[in-house]
Image (tube, helix red, strand yellow):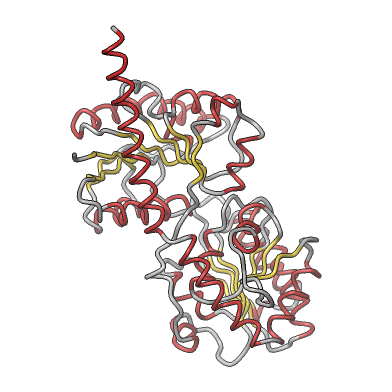
Amino acid sequence: MLMKILWVDVVSEMGGAQYSLLDACRSLTSYPDLEIAVALPPGPLFSCLSDAGITCFPIEPIRARRSGTGLFSTLVKFFRAPSSIRKIIRDFHPDILHANGLPSLLTLRKERKIPIFWHIRDLRQPYPLFREGAFLATRIIAASQAIEEHLAENVSSKTFSRIKLLRNGIDTERYIPRDEREARDCFGLPQGVPLIGMVAHFIPWKRHDLFLETAALIHSRIPDAHFVLAGQDLFHENAKYLDTLKKQAETLGIADRVHFIEDCQATETLFPAFTVLLHPPIGEPFGRVICESLACQIPVVAAASAGPEEIIAGTTKLPENKPLPGILCERKSADDFANAVCKLIAEPQTRTQMGTIGRQLVCERYSISRVAKELHTLYQTTLHEIAEDLRRATIDT
């Protein structure tokens, strides 16, 4: 029986949640009993999905604004959204609605007859809105164990019974080991020197400033080391933050050693240029870039927190006397990060071991094909359970 799935996302700029949606939908199209479509605003994600042959229905973008005319505009868009999506639902006739995040779920608040999946990819949800979302959702998907544990602490047992842990996945055929020299040539990066990278959109909570403090300490010990900050100001809201980071690099005396890559779409070609990936955010709900780096056999130094800790230390039994695929820093300070990075730079054999174990871990636990398989099964079982409930109700009456 053909199952028609309509994903909904109110954002088309390419953040981690959108890359995860893109990869999942691409992989789901390999199942002949699924027909996948996506309702979302025109933009980069819309184009990527369309290029992959996935049906896309345009809707108006919704970006939350907290005050003034921006808040009024946001509220107007939320009131309009259900009517535009309802027309799409009438045209497509989905068996399941799959909301990619809380704002997307809220646009479906008037839908009561179609099962709704709510994919949670963030650790923090505004509690009043979360309660409404939990009421709407037939299934709640936690994208990491850290998210599942956070939900367990904040929801009733009845709501928790609808939660399914389904860790994010990446395309392990796209993120593969590549030649370091070629990767550096692609981005004009120096050859023959240690290169420490950070890949994250330019948002303050990602702690790029701590990366730069760490970079200065590393440079004082390893003078030929270079550093990369790669990301985007995704919603054009953090231009001042980016300027502040560039000034910080100058103040620290490492401006000539720090390479800002502000529009990098093909990150699979960038990771192989690194000697080590440094990821300093605290409270990262998953840490997609960690999986991408490990899939390219590049070891990671990260803060011991939430998603990154789960990926590096908490998801597999490693052989004895083998290193983890990265180093977790408990103190989460610049000194701590610098010590860990310098240790890896000094031990190329350890880096090689970590890289091998890291790719194996990601291929086994975080491949997008696994995500698609589990989603496909969840779609099937959900529709079967609903059909059984309806059959029993008919018999009882």
Quarter holding the C terminus is: top left
* In the foreground, 373 or 60: 373
* In the foreground, 276 or 375: 375
Q: Is residue 306 left or right of residue 33?
A: right
Residue 95's place in the image compared with 231, above or below, is above
Residue 392 lies, in percent from the top left, at: 31, 17
Q: Residue at x 38, y 28 (%)?
A: 108
Q: Residue at x 30, y 56 (%)?
A: 26
Residue 32's place in the image compared with 367, above or below, is above
Q: Is residue 120 left or right of residue 195?
A: left
Residue 153 lies, in percent from the top left, at: 66, 34
> How many numbered marks does the figure carry?
0
Q: Residue at x 48, y 89 (%)?
A: 181
Quarter holding the N terminus is: top left
Residue 226 lies, in percent from the top left, at: 64, 82
* In the foreground, 101 or 176: 176
Q: Residue at x 51, y 44 (%)?
A: 165
Residue 168 lies, in percent from the top left, at: 48, 53
- Image quadrant in which you'd find residue 171: bottom left
Residue 42's place in the image compared with 106, above or below, is below
- Image quadrant in which you'd find residue 107: top left
Q: Is residue 164 left or right of residue 216?
A: left
